[in-house]
Every structure is written in structure tokens, then in C-alpha cells.
Image (cartoon, grey):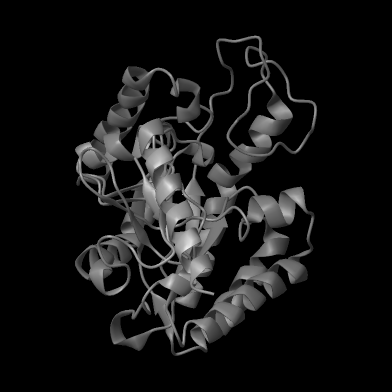
Amino acid sequence: MHYDYIPITHRLPLKWPQRKRVALIITINLETWDLVKDTDKPYYAGGPAILPDVLPGDTPDFPNYTWREYGQRVGAFRLFDMFDEMRVKPSCTINAVTALRRRPMLDAALARGCEILAHNYEQGELLSNYAKQPAKERDVIERSLKVYEQAVGRKARGWLSSSLRGTLNTAGILAQNGLLFYCDLMNDDQPYLVQTPHGPIVSTPYTNEINDFTLLTRRNHTTSEFRDILIEELSELYKEGATTGRIMNVGLHPHVSGRAYRIRALREFIRYAKSLPGVWWTTREEVASWYLKNHESHIPTGGAAGGSRAQTGKPGARKKSAKAQRGRTTSRGAGK
């Protein structure tokens, strides 16, 4: 896979439908973890722990496991109730085992007509573990997609890897399986195309920055600070969106944002967002479908001045790209 390096200043203005400024997507990650793993190495569960001394995978870690499980038993449903109150539909991601072991969370999302993305098989099984074993990575992805189709009743259109830990093969495997978009890349405020051997796939950027794991668990912001950060982010993107459209994703986890004392932050943020007429309350699938039809008016085929190829699995392509970039730089320098 590869994508082009084209800074936002070298793109044409992105014009969302109905002249909206910011595509706002609030994502609830409906995740499920194994209690134990067949390993004596520390078990990274695809997210932060509440207690720092992580145990070996073959030893039950009940404090951390049940802290996360709170979201499955209580937090997710508190979040859904709040979204109902605010008349907003969140986007949801599900691990395959969420559909198999924690079905009521999926049912709650389906009953509300929420967008649902495939999100790996089990949250602690990272695709990056199989970076040098593409057949095993493909097996994880395709088993996840099979469970998704059986549980949701339609084929998956989008994907988010557990902990965003994909490989150079991930985008191609997804494209080959007919997916429209994926969310592992966190490098932009706008969608763009990622090229794969099986055709393009749309990157609809996720974020670990505007994310409750980072803001509440890792940086320990208060409820009011969390709200203020979300409002500040949207406020600035909204100003910028008058010139060229932006995406804002808010990443939520039910065991973190679904605590009673944190719900206020989301309610007040949504109230602010609803006061802005240029906010596009949309889904990633809607964004990706629109972008696939309209990308030429944003980043024409062949890129724009100052662009260069990035992130390819082919060393020769990287060398060629670097040479071309040096040529452009030299050319501009000679003109001064």
C-alpha cells in the first residue's frame, strides 16, 4: 500500500455536501477482551490498563478485565441513552467476539440504526503481531468479516484495526475483500485515497488525540477539561472548514466515557456542536462513498505540487519518490 504526501496547503478546497464545514463522527468502540491468553508474556489488551502492573497473559487480571467489562455491562448503555436524549446517532465499532459474547451491545447499536464498523476479531489480538505472517493476518481479518456479516446482516464496508495496529498488508486485504474505507491512519483532518494492489481504499482518519483513552485515562483531564478540549477542537476546525472541509472524530470507550461523572462532558459538547449549522452529522461510510466519487476535485490523480509518495512496501518506489521529491525541491530552489 502507499499514499501520497500532499500537505493540506497543496490540495484543492474540500467542499462537503450542502457546504457543510466539519464532518463530525462520534465513535463508540464496543470491544471485548479475552480474560487469559496462551502466553506467559505481558498481555497488552489493545488499550491502557487501570492498574499499571500488567500480568502475564496466562494469569487472570481481574482488576483490569472487570474495569473494562464495566463498559459492556453499564457504560455502553449509559452512552446510548445519552445519545438518544441528544437525538444523535454515534458510529460504533465491534470486535467479532463482541457479536459472539456480548451481543446486547451490538443489538443496542443495531436498534438505533448506528453505523457499525468491523474492528478485528478480539481486541487484544493485534494485526501487527502478524506483520511478517500475511496469511495469518488475512485469516484474522476474514474471520472477523465473516462474523460481522452473520451478526449485522450485511457485509462490512469499513474497518478499524485493534489499537490501530495494522501492517503494510492490511489495506490491500481489506480492499480485496470489498471494503470501502479504513481508519487506521491518524495523519489528517481530511479523507484521502490509499492505493493497494487491489484498488484504492478511502482513509477516513481516526484519532488517538481526541480520544477518551488519551485525554481521560493517560492525561487525566477532568470532565470539564474533556468537554472544553472537544469544544476547542471543533471550534477551530469549524473556522478552518469555511475554506476547506474537515473531519472531526471523537473516540470513546464505554468503560471510560461511560462512567456517570463523565457523561456531562459529552452532553454539553454535543449541545455545542448542534448549535453550529455547518456541522455535518454523518457516518464514515457516507463520507467515504462521497469522497470516492469526488476525490478528483480535492486531490487530482497524480497529486499536486509538492506531493510525494509515502509509506510503500516497495523500497524501489521509495527511492524513486525521494529522487523525484529532491528534483522538485532543486527545481524550485533554482527559480529563486
Residue appearing at x 40%, y 46% in the figure: 321
- What is the quadrant of the C terminus in the image? bottom right
Whether residue 325 is visible to the viewer of this picture, yes or no, is yes
Residue appearing at x 78%, y 34% in the figure: 51
Residue 316, x across and y down, in percent: 37, 33
Residue 82, x across and y down, in percent: 54, 68
Whether residue 247 is visible to the viewer of this picture, yes or no, is no
Q: Quadrant of residue 19?
A: bottom left
Residue 239, x across and y down, in percent: 55, 86
- 21 in relation to 116, above or below: below
Q: Nearer the viewer, residue 331 or 206?
A: 331
Q: Nearer the viewer, residue 103 or 169?
A: 169
Count all numbered tags in the image, as a single digit.
Answer: 0
Q: Quadrant of residue 226?
A: bottom right
Q: Is residue 134 left or right of residue 236?
A: left
Residue appearing at x 42%, y 37% in the figure: 98
